[in-house]
């Protein structure tokens, strides 16, 4: 009903806000390091920079953002396109 639609809208807006935050983190760190997270991780940038605190912090923040983007995109897709339960 109407209440379900309102709840779905509120949940969707919250998910989109969180997704936007993670996308911002991803863009900011891509610009800072001039590479994608996969390149940053696979190139062992943290080790190359001598395990500097800021670089290691960026690694964990970026990894969280990458995981968050995947998770939230999946959740939004499921919310927007629920499986047909045969009703």
Image (cartoon, rainbow, N blue to C red):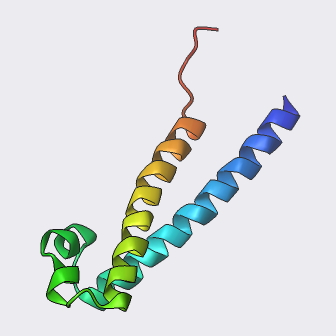
Q: Residue 80: horizontal and vertical position, in percent? A: 58, 39
The quadrant in which the C terminus is found is top right
Query: Residue 5, image x and y in percent?
Result: 78, 38
The correct choice, above or below, for 51 with respect to 9 in the image is below
In this rendered view, identify the residue nearer to me: 10 or 56. 56
The spot of residue 57 in percent (x, y) is 40, 81
On the picture, is 78 further left or further right than 27? right
Vertical side of 24 occupied by 49: above or below: below
- In the rendered structure, the answer to whether residue 37 lies left or right of residue 39 reads right
Q: Quadrant of residue 66?
A: bottom left
The foreground one among 59 and 75 is 59
- The residue sitting at 20% across, 90% down in the picture is 50
Q: Nearer the viewer, residue 53 or 58?
A: 53
Residue drawn at x 33%, y 81% as measured from the top left = 56
State which quadrant residue 46 falls in. Answer: bottom left
Residue furthest right as drawn: 3
Position of residue 78 relative to residue 63, above or below, is above
Query: In the rendered image, which quarter contains the N terminus?
Result: top right
| Residue 83 left/right relative to 2 | left
Q: Give the tally of numbered discs.
A: 0
Which residue is pictured at 44% across the width and 58% down the height? 69
Kindly identify the residue that appears in the image at 86 percent across and 34 percent down. 2
Residue 35: image location, x then y, percent: 21, 80
For residue 78, above or below residue 43? above
Q: Quadrant of residue 17?
A: bottom right
């Amino acid at each position: 009903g109407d209440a379900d639609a309102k709840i779905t809208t509120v949940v969707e807006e919250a998910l989109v806000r969180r997704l936007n935050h993670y996308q911002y983190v991803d863009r900011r760190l891509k610009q800072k390091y001039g590479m994608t997270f996969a390149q940053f991780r696979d190139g062992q940038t943290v080790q190359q920079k001598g395990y500097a605190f800021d670089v290691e912090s960026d690694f964990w923040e970026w990894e969280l953002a990458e995981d968050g983007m995947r998770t939230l995109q999946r959740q939004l897709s499921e919310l927007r396109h629920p499986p047909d339960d045969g009703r």
